[in-house]
Amino acid sequence: MKKFMTRKHTEEHLSNRKERFSDLMGKGLFLLAFSSALSTNIWAQTTTTTNAQTASQNFTGKVCDSKDGSSLIGCTVRVKGKKAATITDANGNYSITAKPGDILIISYIGYETVEVPAGSKKASNIFMVDDSVIMDDVVVTGYQTLKKFNVTGSVNTINNEKISLRSSTGLNGLLEGTVPGLNVYNDNFRIRGGASMNSGNDPLFIVDDFEVEELPENMDMVESIIVLKDASATAIWGSRAANGVIVITTKKGKANDFKISYSNNFKVSAKPNFDDLHRASSEQIIDYDREAHLYGYNSMMGGFGYQGAGYSLSQEILNDYWEDVVIDWETGSVLPMDPTKLAEMDARLNKLKTYSNRKQLEDNLLRNAFRQQHLVSISGGNERINYYLSGSFIGGHSEYVGDKNRSYNINSRMSYKLLHNLTLRSDLSATFDNNDNGYTNLSSDIYNMFPFQMLLDEQGNRIADYTQFSRMDADKYTSEYGYLSFGKNLLDEVDLANNTTKNTDYKARFGLDYRILEGLNLSADYQYERYQSINKDIQSVNSYSVRELINQHTVINENGSSYRIPKGDILDHSQNDIEAWTMKIGATLNRNFGIDKQHYVNATAGFEVRSKHSTTETYRKLGYDD
């Protein structure tokens, strides 16, 4: 059956379709509006986030010492490439305005500069490293300070830690065995062997950027020692550095690091051991002299004359029997001695063989060497002023009786930061030495002394040694002609010695450092030094050297003897005065450049003016009476 829609039904149907269409349109418009709103919200949120990342913010953090974690006061914190900067407060805290991603540069005198991103974890707690920690990576040439990897020459560095372990040995012992290619022998230094036969082979010594006349004795005052070996490393010093350069840097104060320090060293060395010399014994020497006598040596010489060469106690005995050795000049053979005379001679020689002066020498003329050194220092400073004040004493004596040395030093090192890029430096020091030299020939006299020549007899009386002049003739000249005694006893020589040396050394240094821009620095330095050494040796009329000199110039005449030299003490005086000054002006360029700082340039330019005036005065006074 077919259905027919009436007009009324058609209108209702169309009306329903319109309502459904309206509902769909409404829902569609609602979804479109919601989608549009959601899209708008997302865009707004993205815009807000981007603005927060580019806006400046306030960043805070703390700066501490990497060693003990203590707060560092007055550190400079600045934004790289911008003018924004601040300093840390009393607790080491900082607050600075920067944008996320900016680089903060933290710098402090005496510490390695640090760079960290603003807002990072590292920026909240920054630990700075002391410059001394990286001393092994730094080379001080005397004109500039370079990173070791930027130095092309051969260098060796001895840092403060190594110096502290061996400071009691002095500079010689400190360098010996520490630096490859450096040899030290009898206070002479050789870097990679000798280069000259006549001009000397000692290297150039630089102390705190200047050539000096006297080296520091107390190694506790030294911060580092750098040895420059080859031509490329020493080129800056010119021909003076042909044998190498040893650069010594002394200690200085550090900002916000107040210290009161005391250090001491005591060194004891055992007295000389005669076994190491492998000296001939009394028995060996006497057997040698006896054999030469029996084979006719003394007979051929006609006995022992008054000349001192070859005289000894054994020769004195053999001289009594020289006529008992008969030589057959036709056959050249030597006839045997009379048995009675031979037995008598051997008895006297055998008694002499039992003598040994070793214990008397060890007990009366030798001792353990001793050396002590003390150093008291006060150091510290702040962002503008650093200071280092010290006083030291060095004293001791050698292994030979009679000598003694004392040395006093006071030192003041200051640096003043006048401007952010201008620093004034000053260094004042004075050294005073007072040495009693004792009997200076004691070691050689002991070495050349016959082992049977005693210092004391069984009763403790001193025995004269006539090795330098025959006793038989000496007794005759003193008793008949009025000559002074020809005998010598080392104990008397030690007691009579009056030989002193006094040294004074004053130094004054002033310098200016001006930073033109990063990596480019200008410096000007001036040093004045005045050194004086006075040696005064008063030789007593009773000493062997004075008696020998007077006897040499004594003339025998009809009325007895006349002395051509006054009978009195002798004064030997020598004085050396040195006055020197040095002025240096130079500029250094030391900089990395490039996107990754992969390029490096280093250049040094400047000039140096030096003046040195030395005066030496020596004289002798005979018949001296102080």
Image: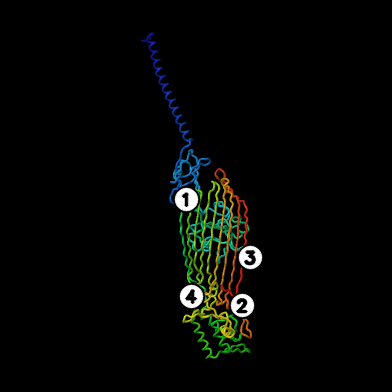
Residue type, label 2: Ile
Mark 3 or mark 2, which is nearer the start of the sequence?
Answer: 3
Q: Residues within 10 Å of mark 3 (few under 14, many from 20)?
A: few
Residue that numbered label 1 is attached to: 256
The numbered dot on residue 612 is none
Q: Position of residue 256 (x, y in %)?
A: 47, 50
Mark 3 or mark 4, which is nearer the start of the sequence?
Answer: 3
Mark 1, secondary structure of its residue: loop
Residue 57 vertical position relative to residue 407 in the rendered view, above or below:
above
Mark 2, secondary structure of its residue: loop
Residue that numbered label 2 is attached to: 565
Mark 3, secondary structure of its residue: loop
Q: Residues within 10 Å of mark 1 (few under 14, many from 20)?
A: many
Could you tell me if the residues under marks 4 and 3 are in contact, i.e. CB atoms within 8 Å? no
Residue type, label 3: Asn
How far separated are the C-alphas under marks 2 and 4? Answer: 33 Å
Residue type, label 4: Asn
Which residue is outermost to the front?
626
How far separated are the C-alphas under marks 2 and 3? Answer: 39 Å
Could you tell me if the residues under marks 2 and 1 are in contact, i.e. CB atoms within 8 Å? no
Query: In front: mark 2 or mark 4?
Result: 2
Q: Position of residue 605 (x, y in %)?
A: 62, 51
Mark 4, secondary structure of its residue: helix
How far separated are the C-alphas under marks 4 and 1? Answer: 55 Å
Residue that numbered label 4 is attached to: 364
Q: Position of residue 497 (x, y in %)?
A: 53, 73
How far separated are the C-alphas under marks 4 and 3? Answer: 41 Å
- Asked whether 331 or 347 is in front, the reply is 347
Residue 217 vertical position relative to residue 343 in the rendered view, above or below:
above
- Asked whether 86 or 344 is in front, the reply is 86
Q: Position of residue 395 (x, y in %)?
A: 49, 65
Confirm whether residue 297 shows in the render: no
